[in-house]
Image: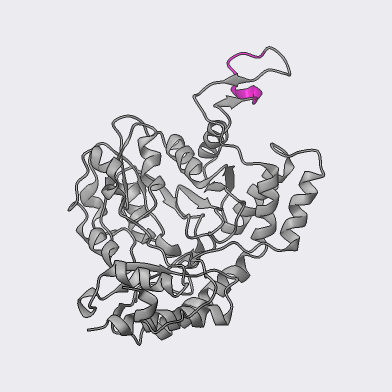
């Protein structure tokens, strides 16, 4: 049966509205052009400038840039000393990279279930997941809403664990007034085009530890150092040594220049996201078939994603039909995320459905709606009208 026919002919929009999109202006373009006309395309001064800018912005002593967020997480796990036999606790409600970075080093991800109100790891369950093999915790700031760091950080200190905060969604967020990026032992930010700012692809680790900073820098450059104070031997001023098995995870000056230009607009980007969220929350709180997320602090979250939970018991169809109907209205919906332990690869490793029941039920009823700074008032209205229209049609 034709979905458009069901809903009365013409879709709400004539053009497709994506769920996320970068906002690049002429200043960003000129920043990149300036690098292209200069002497350094990579390993030049723009990288250090970008790192310094990010560190200052989030209140951390150091920042180390990587080619992407996954590489940054890999580097953080390396700096934390994750190796064969180690366990790392993380959330299943995340992109696979949050757990894959542990596997890369021979460790074992341990999935701790979530709080269904905000999608973040349930901090009350973390201690039950700790064993003598636990080395670290990777909490995920789901949708840009910070995790309960008041519980997680003291717990980590109690058991001598390292906290690597996956803040891919949370650049610009704060936790009780403190900037995300300044609290955990290491914090990862992502600069993918749908995130708060973009470098095309890119990632960053912020930390207050000089030791972690040094390990991260060496890891992203093949495990090589030129630091004379760290050399085993020194053949002369040209000399360098590969001392660890590292990777080529360097970011370019082109990307770094774009990132620095974008970072200057972060506050306005986040303000616009919060404005849209306030409108969404107001309008969707009136729809009985949407379960609102009351525990999210709008003023501290940085709102990478806006997710609604469907009250499936009040609908005549499942989530898939609602999803497809919204696509037919030219609304670019998505789903974030399939719980990591439910991916076939993780199932092949022995992870089974049922180990995180809240995450699994949460996944079945969520839909991600468009949210990005360049959305117009009409775009926001179109999303609200489409959701209202589709859910009204399928309400029992």
Q: Nearer the viewer, residue 2 or 379?
A: 2
Magenta: main secondary structure equals loop
Q: Residue at x 52, y 70 (%)?
A: 17
Can residue 388 be seen by looking at this rendering? yes
x and y, in percent, of residue 332 in the image:
46, 68
Q: Magenta segment, which residues?
A: 226-234
Q: Residue at x 22, y 80 (%)?
A: 314
Residue 312 left/right relative to 213: left
Residue 351 location, x and y as percent?
22, 43
**Which quadrant of the figure has residue 396?**
bottom left
- Answer with left or right where residue 241 lies relative to residue 173: right
**Residue at 75% from the left image edge and 54% from the top image edge:** 31
- Depth check, front residue: 297 or 101: 101
The answer to whether residue 146 is seen in the rendering is no
In the image: residue 358, left or right of residue 337? left
Q: In the image, is 158 to the left or to the right of 76?
A: left
């Amino acid at each position: 049966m034709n979905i458009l026919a069901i809903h009365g002919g013409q879709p709400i929009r004539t053009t497709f509205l994506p769920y996320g999109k970068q906002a690049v202006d002429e200043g960003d373009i000129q920043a990149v052009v300036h690098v292209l006309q200069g002497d350094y395309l990579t390993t030049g001064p723009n990288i250090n400038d970008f790192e310094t800018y990010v560190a200052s912005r989030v209140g951390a002593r150091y920042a180390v840039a990587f080619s992407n967020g996954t590489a940054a997480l890999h580097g953080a796990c390396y700096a934390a000393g994750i190796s064969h036999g180690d366990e790392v606790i993380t959330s299943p409600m995340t992109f696979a990279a949050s757990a894959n970075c542990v596997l890369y080093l021979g460790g074992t991800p341990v999935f701790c279930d979530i709080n269904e109100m905000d999608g973040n790891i349930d901090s009350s369950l973390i201690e039950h997941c700790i064993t003598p093999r636990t080395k670290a915790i990777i909490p995920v700031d789901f949708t840009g809403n910070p995790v309960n760091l008041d519980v997680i950080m003291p717990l980590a200190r109690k058991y001598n664990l390292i906290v690597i905060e996956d803040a891919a969604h949370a650049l610009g967020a704060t936790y009780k007034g403190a900037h995300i990026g300044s609290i955990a032992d290491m914090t990862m930010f992502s600069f993918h085009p749908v995130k708060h700012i973009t470098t095309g692809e890119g990632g960053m680790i912020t930390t207050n530890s000089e030791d972690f900073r040094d390990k991260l820098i060496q890891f992203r450059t093949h495990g090589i150092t030129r630091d004379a104070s760290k050399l085993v031997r020194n053949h002369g001023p040209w000399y360098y040594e590969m001392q660890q098995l590292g990777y080529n995870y360097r970011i370019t000056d082109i990307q770094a220049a774009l990132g620095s230009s974008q970072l200057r607009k972060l506050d306005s980007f986040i303000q616009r996201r919060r404005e849209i969220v306030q409108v969404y929350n107001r309008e969707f709180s009136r729809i009985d078939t949407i379960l609102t997320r009351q525990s999210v602090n709008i003023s501290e979250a940085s709102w990478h994603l806006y997710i609604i939970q469907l009250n499936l018991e009040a609908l005549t169809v499942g989530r898939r039909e609602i999803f497809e109907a919204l696509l037919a209205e030219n609304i670019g919906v998505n789903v974030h995320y399939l719980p990591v332990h439910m991916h076939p690869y993780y199932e092949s490793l022995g992870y089974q459905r049922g180990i995180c029941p809240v995450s699994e039920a949460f996944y079945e009823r969520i839909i991600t709606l468009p949210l990005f700074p360049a959305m117009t008032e009409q775009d926001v209205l179109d999303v609200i009208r489409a959701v209202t229209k589709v859910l009204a049609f399928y309400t029992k």
